[in-house]
Image (cartoon, rainbow, N blue to C red):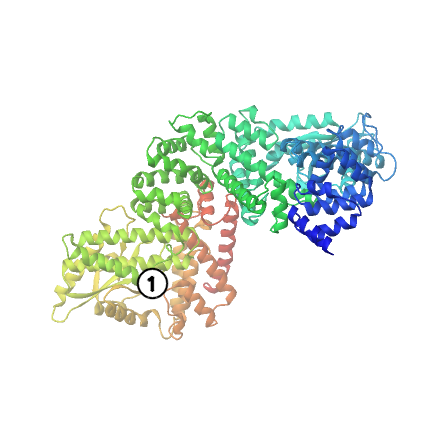
Amino acid sequence: MPRIESTTARLAKLGFADGARAAQLVRQAGTDLDDLLESLVDVADPDLALVSLTRLIEREPAVLGTLRQDDDLKVRLLAVLGVSAALGEHLVRHPAQIAWLAEPQPGEARAELLRAVGADPDAPEPVATGERTLVALRVAYRGRLTHLAARDLTGQASLQEVMAELSDLAGAALEAALAIARAEVDASDVRLAVVGMGKCGARELNYISDVDVIFVAEPREDADEAKALRTATRLAQAMMRACTATTPEGSLWEVDAGLRPEGRSGPLVRTLGSHLAYYRRWAKTWEFQALLKARPVAGDMELGAAYVEAVNDMVWTAATRKDFVEDVQAMRRRVEAHVRSEGERQLKLGPGGLRDIEFAVQLLQLVHGRLDPLLRRRATLPALAALSRGGYVGRDDSRSLAEAYSFLRQVEHLLQLHRLRRTHLVPTGEGDLRRLGRALGMQTDPVGEFTARWRRHAMEARRLHEKLFYRPLLQAVSRLQESEARLSATAAAARLEALGYVDPNGALRHIGALTSGVSRRAAIQRTLLPVMLGWFADTPDPDAALLGFRQVSDKLGSTPWYLRLLRDETAVAARMSRVLGTSRYATGLLMNAPEAVAMLGSDEELAVRPRESLRGEASAAVSRHVGGDGGAETAVAAVRALRRKELFRIAVADIFGLADIETVGGALSSLTDVTLQAAMDAALSKVGDVSSFAVIAMGRLGGLESSYASDADVMFVHRPKPGVEERKATDAAFAVANELRRLLSLPAPDPPLIIDPDLRPEGRQGPLVRTLASYRAYYSRWSSPWEAQALLRARFSAGDAELGAAFTEMIDELRYPQGGLHDDAVREIRRLKARMEAERLPRGADPGLHTKLGPGGLSDVEWVAQLLQLRYAGTLPSLRTTRTLDALRAAVAEELLTPADEAVLAESWRFASRIRDAIMLVKGRPGDSVPRDAGERKLLAQTLGYPPDGSEDFLNDYRRVTRRARLVVDRVFYGA
């Protein structure tokens, strides 16, 4: 017992993680292992190596003598056993292969694997013979794999040599599998080529991976093509089965033909002509990206070479295709989506993973390889080096990226070697991390050192990926002295165009203006722009984003906090990019309130401010300026500046989906109320307070449904103060109304707030301001059904709240008639609606695309709600609301409208309202129709959340939604 304890302690001291288990294994081996234990301590996982070694000794005791006689063999074998449990299992089953590890270099893989299945390597089309060929193939393949792993783990083969040899070994296995298939299928009438794709084609395969292939066939002379293709298909299927079938020695790997034309929906095998016809007519950019890697690997190599030569011309002209920019953007979004969806521990798809690097390199090859043949490399590392030599990627960036890529590939290899399983997930267990760290030469603190190095490389790769496309653009236009090659102006323009910039030369001028010089401002811009150019490229209008960024930077560039904020707060810079590339309206607001950039930092900053908070700030501004030297004009200018900032807040919240259409409409209406109140206070300070004065909101303002383009539809009511004669009070009220309108229409850099009082009694012919008694007299004698309908939206907006309440109480009798509407009035409203549809639609407008007056549009839905209110609100108080959607919801509660009809009408109203707002956001000017121009419609669709290729989906959705709404309108409003 004491001896076992002593052995346990000694083994633990040597570096075995489980000293007791190791001591037990040594004892069970039944022989002296002391001389090997010292060597075991140097491997990645001594415990794992000892388990496999003792099993080997048990199976083949002569192994001990062999190892003691050959130090090189001992080092190689123990290195494999310390990393790969799976290869250890393989050697236990096939100990004779241990002797192979003593050979410095193995023989040619193709010949060895063909001989293993009984085929003649020198035959034009080798055919397998004998039994158990599938097992023989797997044993021979894993023997070669073990030899390669031994040289890899002992530093006798570089990463690129390992990847190339793994790819060649896969090609040899495919050749042997094809020989097995020929033993099953008579293929005398057809030639079949196996073209390697992906990592196999690029000769950068890892230890365990699907092997991507494409099959190309041609009938032999005088053979029937259809029959030959059927034969080739059976041959290809048999070859794939030979690789994937499960045997006592397991399987090799999956053979994936999914990259073929039409993917899994297309035929497995095609002729060369069929392939080329598909690529010329139907292929997407991602398919040409995949073809970058194509290389003949098995079968008829002459036919495979002809295929690669034929598709190469198309690969390198892909950047000139009509949809290239859209495809590239879609590919970048797809990669970003993968990156976001995968965990941080993913080597391949996680942030800063292998896919990041490979995609970036391939995309740059596609963009620039058309004009520069030196970039036409299949493998990632040689392609990256070529990009650096040509100035397409910065030299330091290229070096850092290559280091990160090499490290990640090494880790990937070690992960897969352990169990010979396809995995890209960095483990969390300390033992696994320790094995990885030690295999990479980290001895002091393998877990901590590995984790830190992995995260550093992943972070660096992610950072560089974000800048890789854009940093050389800055060098192309900068005047700084650089020792390395620069991107030419032509290449820079080509890259910008490929990334979605319509005017690449103009973009280069903006980049030059922002980054040229040696000032600190230019230096920070050179740091910011490589990332921001990428964010601009993801917006609907990259050119507008870059122009807007230059304009804002010109205004704020000398302000200390601006560039520092963008540099240090990623969220601010990212959101600013999105805003500038989406909305001319918001960009215009930002130009005149550039300090509003600061509110982009958080969702809380973009939350709609309560009305009372706004009213307090506006009132304080008026009091401050009216009481000082500025007067009413200065006071209202301050209020308009507040409105400008709040409009920007609402617009940005809208763009980022932080406020729905009802919230936006309410916020804009409340902001207008506050502005009217402040302007009225300023006007009263100038005119004098001799009459109570109230502003009554009408139309969309009254309904709390204002859009960005809405005028302020209002009516003015006043009541003389006690002791003031009515004539004097009326003149004063008239002066207040006119002064309010004047103050809000003074020239200023703000969006105008047009005061429209035309809904007042007698319209433009009537008095601008009336007393409460005058309104009552008019409505009791002269009002028509349309005026009662217009008053459904009337509410108090600003001024004397008591007077406003008296006005709304006075009109309730008119707009909510106790007996409802008589039939003649209903018919009159329906006639008025029909005439409006026929007469008010602008000439040349497509009714189906007009959001306000078109079928199923805003007017349709609002008139349904208003007719229900006029008919039933007199007896059903729940219908007494100025808001359209609230009225529809109340109608459902009162069983005047079915929930299904309400849902259809509400969906159409929201969609049409969102479109109108989006038109204003995108174009900076109002519009009621869905644009006919495809380019404008695409921008609008993206702003509404559709993908870049979703313009037609957007149009179809709008037609569908409004068509369904019109059916409800015909039934509910017209009684059809």
Query: Where is residue 695, by image quadrant?
Result: bottom left
Q: Residue 482, position in %: x, y? A: 42, 26
Q: Residue 115, position in %: x, y? A: 82, 31
Identify the residue at horizontal 41%, vertical 59% (top origin). Answer: 662
Residue 830 visible within the image: no
Label 1, secondary structure: give it.
Answer: helix
- Amino acid of disc 1: Ala
| Residue 685 higher or lower than 391, as above or below | below
396 or 942, which lies in front? 396
Q: Residue 787, position in %: x, y? A: 32, 64
Q: Is residue 481 left or right of residue 161?
A: left
470 or 725, which lies in front? 470
The crowding category of the residue bearing disc 1, from other C-alpha atoms within 10 Å (few below 14, some 14 to 19, many at least 20), is some
Query: Where is residue 714, by image quadrant?
Result: bottom left
| Residue bearing mark 1 | 790
168 or 945, which lies in front? 168
Q: In the image as oriented, which residue stretches furthest toward the right?
A: 130
Residue 958 visible within the image: yes
Query: Where is residue 863, by image quadrant?
Result: bottom left
